[in-house]
């Protein structure tokens, strides 16, 4: 039997009960890791734990609370013996679309969830990884960190902070054998769209299905991304295949951020054609 790419490793995945986190947690298990899922979805977490009896554990964790983060990491060490991989994936978006809509409480909340939580998780993961001689930290960023118009204001700013946090932490932790990298997903068919709007799970699922059906129209690769697409990127960073990679940001977006639509869609008008003419 061929050993998996994460054989012998212990991973913690925040937000691991749904979407990208779920796909990553299950892929990590399939590749040989023992995984602790840290999430606030108790029912889903317990069902996931039962499904992967002995290989995956669930612990309730609100990542906006430092004590919950500490407890989740401690649970991974207690149950599985240590920590090798941390995937800071938990997150949801805000609703602040324009500058005049900025709300202080909502701004502080989205930064606590999206940017502060990964920082605190790294803080408390570092000594556990150092005990094992190193490790891999993966942060979920977003294409919203790379340009305007992809997401609301607070979320976009917080994800940009995640990218800089990733680069800075990668430099600081390299001497301890700890790599820190980021993944920037594009249009991925998950429940984050409905959850960000506060919709019921049923309506949120309908939005997810719509993204899966129509998302391909927005990018050169003519389909919406799936959680498994991002999970494969997370597996690369979690595994020893990326042992010489740190401080990187892997964009997984189907080409969404490549440039203006006319660059890849022959039916889209070229706004420069009226000025320079067609070659």
Image (tube, rainbow, N blue to C red):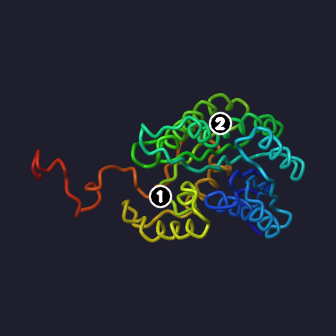
Residue 155 percent location from the top left of the image: 52, 43
For label 1, the crowd category at 10 Å Cα-Cα, with few meaning under 14, some 14 to 19 and many 20 or more, is many
First in sequence: mark 1 or mark 2? 2
Residue occupied by mark 1: 187
Front of the two marks 1 and 2: 2
Q: How many marks?
A: 2
Please indicate whether residue 188 sits to the left or right of residue 135 in the image.
left
Q: Position of residue 127 (x, y in %)?
A: 80, 34
Picture residue at 51% right of the left edge, 40% below the top: 154
Label 2 CA crowd tier, 10 Å (few <14, some 14–19, many 20+):
many
Q: Which mark is residue 116?
A: 2
* Residue at image location 11% in from the left, 45% down from the top: 275
Q: Nearer the viewer, residue 152 or 179?
A: 152
Query: In 3D space, how far apart are the residues under numbered discs 1 and 2 (Cα atoms)?
Result: 24 Å
Image spot of residue 272 (x, y percent): 17, 47
- Is 149 displayed left or right of 133 in the figure? left
Q: Determine whether the residue tagged by mark 1 lies in a helix, strand or loop.
A: loop
Asked if the residue under mark 2 is in contact with the one under mark 1, i.e. CB atoms within 8 Å, the reply is: no
For label 2, the SS is: helix
In the picture, residue 119 is in which quadrant? top right
Nearer to me, 260 or 47: 47
Question: 37 or 4: nearer the eye?
Answer: 37
User: Residue 157's spot in the image, x, y percent?
Assistant: 50, 38
Please state, as top left, top right, bottom left or bottom right, where the N terminus lies in the image: bottom right
Q: Is residue 167 left or right of residue 2?
A: left
Q: Nearer the viewer, residue 66 or 120?
A: 66
């Amino acid at each position: 039997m061929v050993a998996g790419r994460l054989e012998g490793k212990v991973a913690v995945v925040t937000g691991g009960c749904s979407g990208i986190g779920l796909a990553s947690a299950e892929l990590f298990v399939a590749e040989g890791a023992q995984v602790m899922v840290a999430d606030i979805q108790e029912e889903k977490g317990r069902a996931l734990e039962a499904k992967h009896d002995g290989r995956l554990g669930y612990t309730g964790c609100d990542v906006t609370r430092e004590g919950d983060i500490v407890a989740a990491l401690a649970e991974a060490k207690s149950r599985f013996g240590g920590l090798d991989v941390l995937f800071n994936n938990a997150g949801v978006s805000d609703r602040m679309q324009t500058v005049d809509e900025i709300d202080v409480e909502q701004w502080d909340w989205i930064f606590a969830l999206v940017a502060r939580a990964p920082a605190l998780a790294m803080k408390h993961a570092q000594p556990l990884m150092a005990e094992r001689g190193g490790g891999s930290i993966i942060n979920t960023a977003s294409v919203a960190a790379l340009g305007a118009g992809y997401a609301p204001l607070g979320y976009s700013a917080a994800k940009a902070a995640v990218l800089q946090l990733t680069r800075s932490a990668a430099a600081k932790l390299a001497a301890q054998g700890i790599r820190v990298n980021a993944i920037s997903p594009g249009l991925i068919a998950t429940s984050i769209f409905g959850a960000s709007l506060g919709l019921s799970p049923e309506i949120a699922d309908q939005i997810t299905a719509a993204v899966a059906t129509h998302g391909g129209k927005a990018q050169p690769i003519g389909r919406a991304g799936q959680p498994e697409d991002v999970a494969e990127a997370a597996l690369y960073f979690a595994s020893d295949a990326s042992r010489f990679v740190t401080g990187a940001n892997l964009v997984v977006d189907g080409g969404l951020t490549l440039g203006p639509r006319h660059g890849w869609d022959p039916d889209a008008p070229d706004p420069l054609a009226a000025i320079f003419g067609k070659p």
